């Protein structure tokens, strides 16, 4: 039943990512490719940048894997914000980043969520109970084959010894936001998403946090992409590392890896 939905979600994600590419080709718009889990916070950051500078940038959101493949295929993005260093490595190894600009910008963590009105009984203190609590339902996740949140999820479930019990009971989605939507709509009883996604939704509740040592560190890597000089892209790249954007990321629950910037900007 979920397979057609997965296919539709993938097609929609590809089409949405293509719209800013067309704008870039026709109008010289500066396009930012960013992981789906950054969608709300980066829209806030781009609005702040435009208010401050008068320059316009257009973010395009999808799974980091899909965006990386599009960049390698020639998509005219100027900045890549990846939720996984593996996909930034992929773009860099293709010679399509400006390596001297690459930075580790943000961190995050994984949580288990359930529908807010779905009758979940508080926290799930023992994650080993998850397979039983799933019942006949499925666990919504980013596709573990390529979506960063799914890759981290698989690592964590393997580390916890739960992977064999849930591997065939997943609802793997084209990006982590679509996994969140499944839980919000009550189509999945549980999902594993980033803590920032859970915090941004009033339609799910966090029932457990996955151990951070159960998976590779969740690091959002950013870099300017190779291509023609783009002063607006360079200015926005500086902006996302600066105090205004750092406070926006911090308020949303991301770990800002340059904590000294946050401490000064946000009054810590």
Image (cartoon, rainbow, N blue to C red):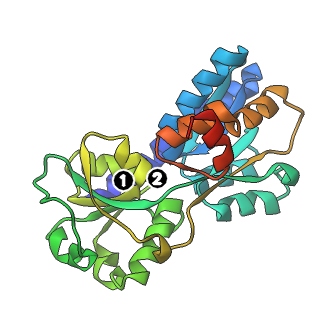
What is the crowding at mark 1: few (fewer than 14 residues within 10 Å), some, or many (at least 20)? many
Q: Is residue 167 above or below residue 35?
A: below
Residue drawn at 70 percent across, 40 percent down: 241
Q: Distance between the residues labelled 2 and 1?
A: 7 Å
x and y percent of residue 109 in the render?
46, 60
Q: Answer whether labels 2 and 1 touch (C-beta < 8 Å).
A: yes
Left or right: 218, with 212 as reference point: right
x and y percent of residue 122 in the render?
16, 59
Residue 134, image quadrant: bottom left
Instruction: Tell me the element at label 2.
Output: loop
Asked whether 259 or 267 is in front, the reply is 267
Q: In this view, does 72 lie above or below 20?
A: below
Left or right: 91, with 112 as reference point: right
Asked whether 9 or 228 is in front, the reply is 228
Left or right: 203, with 239 as reference point: left
Asked whether 92 or 242 is in front, the reply is 242
Q: In which quarter of the image is the C terminus?
A: top right
Residue 175 marker = 2
Residue 78, image quadrant: top right
Residue drawn at 23 percent across, 71 percent down: 125
Residue 179 marker = 1
């Amino acid at each position: 039943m979920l397979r057609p939905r997965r296919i539709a979600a993938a097609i929609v994600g590809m089409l949405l990512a293509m719209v800013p590419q067309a704008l870039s080709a026709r109008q010289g718009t500066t396009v930012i490719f960013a992981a789906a889990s950054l969608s709300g916070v980066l829209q806030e950051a781009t609005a702040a940048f435009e208010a401050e500078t008068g320059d316009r940038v257009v973010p395009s959101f999808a799974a980091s894997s899909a965006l990386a493949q599009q960049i390698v295929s020639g998509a005219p993005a100027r900045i890549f914000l990846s939720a996984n260093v593996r996909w930034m490595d992929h773009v860099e190894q293709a010679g399509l980043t400006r390596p001297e600009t690459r930075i580790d910008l943000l961190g995050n963590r994984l949580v288990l969520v359930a529908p807010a009105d779905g009758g979940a009984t508080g926290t799930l203190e023992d994650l080993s109970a998850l397979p039983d609590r799933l019942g006949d339902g499925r666990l919504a996740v980013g596709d573990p084959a390529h979506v960063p949140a799914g890759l981290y999820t698989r690592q964590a479930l393997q580390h916890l010894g739960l992977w064999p019990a849930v591997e065939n009971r997943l609802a793997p989605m084209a990006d982590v936001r679509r996994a969140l939507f499944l839980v919000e709509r009550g189509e999945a009883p549980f999902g594993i998403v980033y803590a920032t996604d859970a915090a941004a939704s009033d339609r799910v509740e966090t029932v457990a946090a996955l151990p951070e040592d159960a998976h590779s560190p969740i690091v959002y890597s950013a870099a300017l992409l190779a291509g023609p000089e783009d002063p607006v892209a360079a200015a926005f790249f500086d902006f996302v590392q600066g105090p205004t954007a750092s406070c926006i990321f911090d308020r949303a629950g991301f770990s800002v890896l340059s904590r000294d910037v946050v401490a000064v900007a946000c009054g810590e």
